Image (cartoon, rainbow, N blue to C red):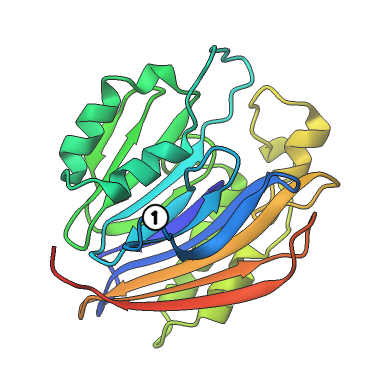
Amino acid sequence: MCLILFSWKQKPGYKLILAANRDEFYERPTQEAGFWKDHPEILAGRDLEAGGTWMGITRYGRFAAVTNYRDPGIERDNTPSRGHLTADFLKSDLTPEVYLRTISKKGDAYYGFNLLVGNPDEMWYYNNINHEMRELPPGSYGLSNALLDTSWPKVQLGKEMFEKVSQLGAISEEAFLGIMQNSQKAEDHDLPSTGVSYELEKAISSMFIETETYGTCCSTIMTIDNDHHIRLVEKSYPVGKRTERTKQFEIQLGLH
């Protein structure tokens, strides 16, 4: 993912409310959200080039999501795919804390990343830039291609819009999708400086990104309520070889 907005144990009746965009090169082969044939307990999209996923959840409520940390100046050889960080947590039985402590021992082998892992009881965050690891208290959060809650314009705007929609009586998936389709670009004086050209920095400063070869390929809305019911909606956009499609899934959490 490249933008994740989420509320953790903050709205009455819900453990998690999440809205996320996946930004990618249009030509990268991708499988839409679905239950994996080789791991039928996992509900996630899949990167068909490396085999991992950007975000997913299991029938038992294990959740994981990853974003890249943007820094073109970092160079590493033979780095493993960051999509396996999420997939491996979904496949494992380790607690979120134990899993992140395991990952932290080999975090420097990867390009920069932010990793969220959790279950209906706890949510944890780790990055391999400053190696921050912590359990997240109830609250609202925004994560893009810097560290958690870094005040990039798209993160700030997204959090403000997300808060307003979250405070409405009923959860509106269409309203959350509307947020994620916002293409407002940052003003020049507010642009982050991440080591890419001005033109690219401007183009990717919006929540919804659209260039000739790279941009937002799908948006995902996911909720877990206090009755352990999961609902996931994924909207794919007609970019590259992809077609516009909306898929919906519901899971009543089992015991594990």
Q: Residue at horizontal 32%, vertical 20%?
A: 106
x and y percentages locating residue 103 in the rendered image: 29, 29
Q: Amino acid at mark 1?
A: Asp
Q: Residue at horizontal 57%, vertical 80%?
A: 174
Q: Is residue 109 above or below residue 199?
A: above
The residue beneath circle 1 is 38
Outermost residue on the right side: it is 212
- Direction from residue 220 to residue 62 in the image, left or right: left
x and y percentages locating residue 62 in the rendered image: 26, 57
Q: Is residue 138 above or below residue 101?
A: below
Mark 1 burial class by Cα count in 10 Å: few <14, some 14-19, many 20+: few
How many numbered badges does the structure rendering display? 1
- Direction from residue 149 to residue 92 in the image, left or right: left
Outermost residue on the front side: it is 38
Label 1 residue SS: loop
Q: Residue at horizontal 79%, vertical 57%?
A: 241
Query: Quadrant of the rendered structure where residue 92 is?
Result: top left
Q: Is residue 13 above or below residue 97?
A: below
